[in-house]
């Protein structure tokens, strides 16, 4: 354990293995058409409030490992408490200009070995991206504003239980079980109410790192998210860089897709993009229950 309470990542020694893990985990995805949203003169952009700033920094874990700048979360929180006016100006300017600072878009990549896995395979390591704490606070401010649209009526689908307040895996499991319990209740014979229930679970390989940015932005537009939030999220996606180290020295990799694991915005942006899956229409009594990228297709019918 490090003195900040985070596990020390034991990096593989082979540069080819590290590069292979990076290439496998972060696929090259061609980008769609660029999002062009000229600011409308009448568009109001609310300034970041002291309440928003304090709420965002309180939700950053103090014992989490620092980002590439090496500044601990606890030190940044002290700075915010001493001069909140500086941070309010910076974050408000980011929203007004639609620019997510390029420095905060660099992420330091480390690999954590999975127990009992062969050390010479990229899949034997769990990826971890270390992000700038100052950038995480800006992400939290954006995320809190996005939730006003995703959690309102007509926002995210009810059967999505992942990454949402007041919902858990237990709720998702209970949703599926209650549907099955209701289906098999009653009698099987003629005019009986008993039915069959089939459940198929689907797992998407490397889902979070493969999410297309243009699909996420299109989904945000369907939710009628304000243009200023669309602009800064488009900026958040652009020119992202992954820094990693091998025994031959530091290297970098351009990221072209995905929601950064360990980021604040990643979960809500994933839910927004994946929402279309949960809204698919099927013939008969078929529904989808989801928890993040794991989904269960639940079908109920009188006859097999």
Image: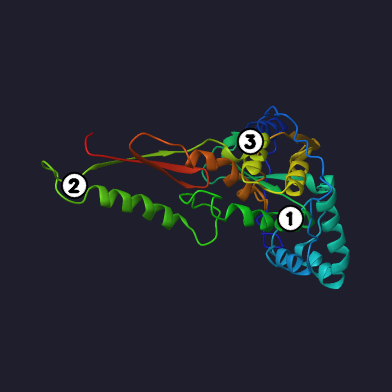
Q: Residue at x 54, y 43 (%)?
A: 275
In the picture, the quarter occupied by the N terminus is bottom right
Residue, disc 3: 215
Alpha-carbon neighbours of circle 3 within 10 Å: few (<14), some, or many (≥20)? some
Answer with mark 2 or mark 3, whichever residue precedes in sequence. Answer: 2
Q: Is residue 119 left or right of residue 166?
A: right
Select label 1 or label 3 by which is in front. 3
* Depicted 279 relative to depicted 175: above or below: above
Q: Is residue 186 above or below residue 4?
A: above
**Looking at the image, is 166 positioned above or below residue 19?**
below
> Residue 222 at what x, y percent from top left?
62, 42
For residue 136, which numbered disc appears in the image? 1
Mark 2 vs mark 3, CA separation in Å: 42 Å
Indicate which disc residue 193 carries.
Answer: 2
Give the percent coordinates (x, y) of residue 84.
84, 68
Q: Secondary structure at mark 3?
A: helix
Q: Nearer the viewer, residue 70 or 208?
A: 208
């Amino acid at each position: 354990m490090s003195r900040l309470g985070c596990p020390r990542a034991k990096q593989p020694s082979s540069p080819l293995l590290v590069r292979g893990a990076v290439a496998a985990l972060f696929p090259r995805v061609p980008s769609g058409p660029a999002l062009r949203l000229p600011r409308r003169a009448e568009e109001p952009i609310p300034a970041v409030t002291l309440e928003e700033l304090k709420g965002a920094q309180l939700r950053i874990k103090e014992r989490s490992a620092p980002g590439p700048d090496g500044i601990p979360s606890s030190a940044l929180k002290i700075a915010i408490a001493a001069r909140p006016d500086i941070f309010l100006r910076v974050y408000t300017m980011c929203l007004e200009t639609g620019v997510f600072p390029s420095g905060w878009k660099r992420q330091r990549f480390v690999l954590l070995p999975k127990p009992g896995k062969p050390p010479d395979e990229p899949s034997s390591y769990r990826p971890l991206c270390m992000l700038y704490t100052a950038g995480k606070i800006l992400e939290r401010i954006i995320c809190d504003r996005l939730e006003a649209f995703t959690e309102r009526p007509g926002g995210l689908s009810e059967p999505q239980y992942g990454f949402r307040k007041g919902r858990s895996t237990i709720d998702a499991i209970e949703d599926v079980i209650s549907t099955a319990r209701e289906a098999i209740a009653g009698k099987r014979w003629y005019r009986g109410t008993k039915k069959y229930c089939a459940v198929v679970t689907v797992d998407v390989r490397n889902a979070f790192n493969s999410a297309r940015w243009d699909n996420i932005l299109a989904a945000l537009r369907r939710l009628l998210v304000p243009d200023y939030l669309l602009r800064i999220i488009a900026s958040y996606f652009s020119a992202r860089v992954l820094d990693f180290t091998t025994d031959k020295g530091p290297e970098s990799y351009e990221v072209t897709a995905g929601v950064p694991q360990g980021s604040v915005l990643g979960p809500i942006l994933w839910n927004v993009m994946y929402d279309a899956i949960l809204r698919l229409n099927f013939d008969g009594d078929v529904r989808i229950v989801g928890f993040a990228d794991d989904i269960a297709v639940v079908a109920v019918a009188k006859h097999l």
